Image: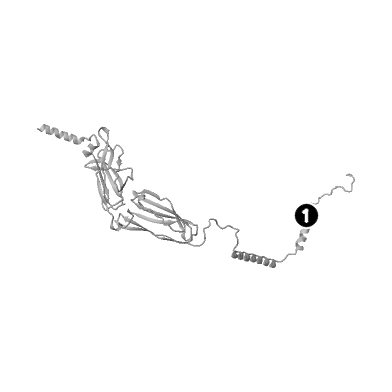
Amino acid sequence: MKKPTLLLSLLIAAAAQNPVWGDSVEELQSARHLEISSELIPADGIVPGQRVELAITIATDRWFTGGTRLEIPEVPGLVILQTNNFASNSSENRNGQSWVVQRWTLDVFPQRHGNFTIGPLTASVKISGEDASTLEGELYSPKLTFRTAVPESLSRAEHWVAAPMYKVSQSFDKDLDTLKTGDAFQREVVFEASDVMAMMLPAFNVEKLDGLTAYPQPSKLTNSSNRGTMIARRVEQISYIVEAQGRYQLPARDYFWWDTRSAQLQMRFLPAVDIHIGGGQASDQPATSGSQLEPLQILKYALGAAFIGAILWLFYRRIPRIPIAAIVAPLGTALRKLNQMRKPALPSRLNPDSSAGE
């Protein structure tokens, strides 16, 4: 009886030193060399529209030989998005043994109140087997259930944004106090929030005002990430044309914000904008020179000419007059001297009394 007991002990020890990995992913999971788990963050206190993080963790004491693919389930009333195409990889020590860990994150946005069930979610994996082989198969995460509810403070709101941060602002491209009939101006309204998608930000309904025609442009939706935080942005641009004089008001807007950090209702506002269109019309061309002078301009020019004339008359009266004869006599003497200098220095005949040259 001692020999079989000793042999069994040796076999158990050898199996512990050289564990059997299995011939499939299912066997690795059954032998606890591979596991998958899931959780929701947060797990409760969720309102419709709030982002919930679905974390999928896959771990093994072997190693991954290829990429992991997740199959996202469809759940009525939920928007489930895989915003990150890569997992967060790490390693950890479990009972003195090194495990490789993949952590995947999905974004879940409930669109209504009530109960929801997610899963099982399918993960296709490639794990190293014996003799450097690769085992391919599928893992299934546990089902997760959660509930969303509308707080009493939101019961009368038609739309709200559930996020840690929410901003609403507006601006104009010109001064509204100087508008005239025919002028155009542009209005820009910006919605910005964190941990939501841009498509979940509120739409902007343009008011209709007689005499002030609005031309909205297509909405600009952008989603970005800043240090791991999702930032959603919606930009609305509206062009207005002033068609008639009068007083107009762009009405105030109220927006509901459920602050997920404090679990409290907050408000965001756009103030009302008053516009007064006075007399006159917009001109596309500036005034050109050569137009008729106004009476005030004519008076200014006449006074300037009179002043210049008075200055010239005073110079004429005060400056002593120089006799013209005193100026002409010296000039005549100088001209005569010049003419004499132009005559030849020798006579035309060297010996005028001789007849040799005749």
**In the image, is residue 46 above or below residue 100?**
below
Q: Name the residue under label 1.
A: 338
Near-viewer residue (126 or 294): 294
x and y, in percent, of residue 23 in the image: 23, 34
- Secondary element at image label 1: helix
x and y, in percent, of residue 230 in the image: 34, 49
x and y, in percent, of residue 262 in the image: 29, 56
**Which quadrant of the figure has residue 36?**
top left
Can I make out residue 169 in this image? yes
Identify which residue is drawn at 16% across, 35% down: 12
Residue type indicated by callout 1: Leu
x and y, in percent, of residue 31 in the image: 21, 38
Q: Quadrant of the N terminus?
A: top left
Left or right position of 177 against 12: right
**Which quadrant of the figure has residue 305?**
bottom right
Left or right position of 248 against 307: left
